């Protein structure tokens, strides 16, 4: 059985709580990612997503050069255990209206799962297999 651990991105990218919003947006652009964990004093204290940048910054006209990412990040609420199924992750994202889940092994953060990761997985398992006659 497939698990979230097989699909998740193990490369956890984070940004300091004190970084500017512009720095976070540039890092997301450069790394082609849709979320970052926010780090303070060596611990992950929050998460920020592309949607946060659009809704909290662009739509409100906030100065991305002056405001810190810590001021708009939210606590890590949407987590899933690494041993859960892709279907469970899909259901959780749908029910909570989110596109990213923080993956945990017990209390330790071990990865990030995005809706894109799930899309690739479900497309792969649903593709018709070409057989030899």
Image (cartoon, helix red, strand yellow):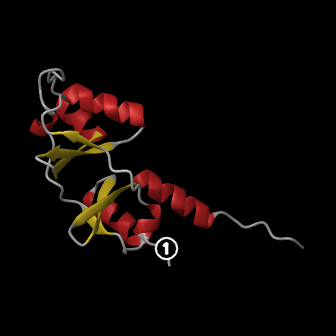
**Which quadrant of the rendered structure holds the C terminus?**
bottom right
Residue at 13% x, 31% y is 68
Q: Is residue 41 left or right of residue 79?
A: left
Residue at 32% x, 45% y is 13
The residue most toward the right is 133
Residue at 50% x, 79% y is 1
Residue 114 percent coordinates (x, y): 39, 53
Q: Quadrant of residue 66?
A: top left
The residue wearing badge 1 is 2
Count of all numbered marks drawn on residues in the image: 1
- State whether residue 79 is above or below residue 85: above
Residue at 86% x, 71% y is 132
Residue 93 percent coordinates (x, y): 32, 60
Which residue is more in the foreground, 8 or 77?
8
The residue most toward the front is 42
Residue 31 percent coordinates (x, y): 40, 36
Q: How many other residues sit within 10 Å of disc 1, few (<14), some (14-19) or many (≥20)?
A: few
The residue most toward the bottom is 1
Residue 34 percent coordinates (x, y): 35, 42
Q: Is residue 60 left or right of residue 30?
A: left
Label 1's element? loop
- State whether residue 49 is above or below residue 4: above
Q: Is residue 13 left or right of residue 68?
A: right
- State whether residue 51 is above or below residue 22: below
Q: Is residue 76 left or right of residue 93?
A: left
């Amino acid at each position: 059985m497939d698990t979230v651990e097989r699909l998740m991105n193990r490369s956890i990218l984070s940004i300091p709580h004190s970084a500017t919003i512009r720095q976070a947006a540039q890092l997301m652009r450069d790394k082609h990612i849709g979320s970052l964990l926010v780090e303070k004093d060596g611990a992950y204290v929050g998460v920020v997503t592309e949607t946060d940048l659009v809704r909290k910054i662009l739509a409100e006209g906030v100065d991305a050069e002056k405001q810190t990412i810590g001021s708009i990040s939210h606590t890590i609420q949407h987590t899933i255990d690494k041993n859960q199924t892709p279907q469970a992750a899909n259901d959780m994202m749908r029910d909570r209206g989110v596109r990213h889940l923080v993956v945990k092994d017990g209390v330790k953060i071990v990865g990030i799962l995005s809706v894109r990761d799930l899309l690739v997985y479900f497309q792969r398992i649903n593709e018709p297999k070409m057989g030899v006659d």
